[in-house]
């Protein structure tokens, strides 16, 4: 068990450095040699863990989203007020802390690769499904507690996902026109209307 744990920790270290190299230099220049040099280990050790560059990138995509469910759980676990709890979820996913967790070079680089690589595309599908599961669960909980069961939580989760992707893209392209906090406030106003008004989700 101890050896397995050490192996898992070593892989995390490698993936963290892989992410850093990708963020600084892009996909083409992310190599086993550069990752090994930064870790001060031999190139064969990296090969031992991943075999190919593709496998390392695949696991790096998983690494990016490794603990989102745990983060959300920790943020809301002591919040009883349904509005405050839901607002915390919105603030996290729309806020700068979530955006900073994912470097634009890495995220959009992997997205580009997914257009040509079905394995990476499947990883992105899993990420979206994971996001939907976490957010759907929180939205469903809010609607049940507030007895608004006529509203479809799946629709709200989908809209939130689309708004996050759009906001992050515009921010990355520097064409959001207004400061991100102001845009976040506008998006949250729309989301709360969706959670309150039946007509807007039917």
Image: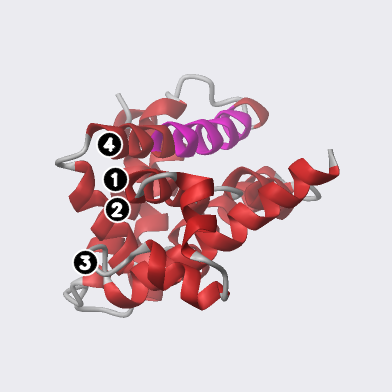
Q: Quadrant of the C terminus?
A: top left
Residue 126, percent across and down? 41, 33
Do the residues bearing badges 2 and 1 touch, measured as CB atoms within 8 Å?
Answer: yes
Residue 131 on the magenta span: yes
Q: Residue 108's image quarter?
A: bottom left
Closer to the eye: label 1 or 4: 4
Residue 199 on the magenta span: no
Q: Residue at x 79, y 45 (%)?
A: 3
Question: Where 149 falls versus 40 (above or below)?
Answer: above
Question: Where 94 falls versus 103 (above or below)?
Answer: above
Query: Does residue 182 appear in this view?
Result: yes
Q: Secondary structure at mark 4?
A: helix
- Which residues lie in the magenta part? 128-143
Q: Is residue 58 left or right of residue 89?
A: left
Residue situated furthest top in the rendering: 150
Q: Residue at x 67, y 30 (%)?
A: 145
Q: CA distance from mark 1 to mark 4?
A: 17 Å
Q: Residue at x 40, y 47 (%)?
A: 191
**Dot 1: within a 10 Å radius of its alpha carbon, few (fewer than 14), some, or many (20 or more) residues?**
few
Residue for badge 4: 121
Q: Secondary structure at mark 2?
A: helix
Disc on the earlier residue, 3 or 2: 2
Q: Secondary structure at mark 3?
A: helix
Disc on the earlier residue, 4 or 2: 4
**Dot 2: within a 10 Å radius of its alpha carbon, few (fewer than 14), some, or many (20 or more) residues?**
few
Residue for badge 1: 162
Residue 113, percent across and down? 21, 49
> What number is the disc on residue 170?
3
Q: CA distance from mark 4 to mark 3?
A: 22 Å
Do the residues bearing badges 1 and 3 touch, measured as CB atoms within 8 Å?
Answer: no
Disc on the earlier residue, 4 or 3: 4
Residue for badge 2: 165
């Amino acid at each position: 068990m101890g050896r397995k744990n050490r192996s898992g920790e070593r892989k995390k270290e490698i993936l963290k450095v892989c992410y850093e190299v990708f963020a600084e230099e892009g996909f083409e220049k992310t190599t086993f040699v550069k990752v090994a040099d930064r870790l001060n280990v031999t190139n064969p050790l990296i090969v031992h863990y991943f075999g190919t560059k593709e496998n390392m990138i695949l696991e790096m995509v998983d690494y990016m989203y490794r603990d989102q469910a745990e983060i959300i759980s920790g943020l809301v676990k002591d919040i009883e007020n349904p509005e405050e709890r839901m607002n915390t979820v919105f603030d996290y996913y729309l806020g700068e802390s979530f955006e900073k967790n994912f470097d634009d070079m890495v995220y959009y680089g992997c997205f580009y690769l997914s257009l040509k690589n079905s394995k990476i595309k499947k990883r992105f599908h899993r990420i979206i499904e994971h996001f939907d599961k976490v957010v759907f669960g929180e939205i469903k909980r809010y609607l049940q507690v507030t007895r608004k069961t006529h509203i479809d939580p799946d629709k709200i989760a989908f809209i939130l996902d689309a708004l996050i992707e759009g906001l992050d893209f515009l921010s990355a392209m520097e064409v959001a026109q207004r400061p991100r906090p102001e845009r976040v406030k506008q998006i949250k106003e729309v989301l709360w209307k969706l959670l309150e008004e039946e007509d807007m989700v039917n």
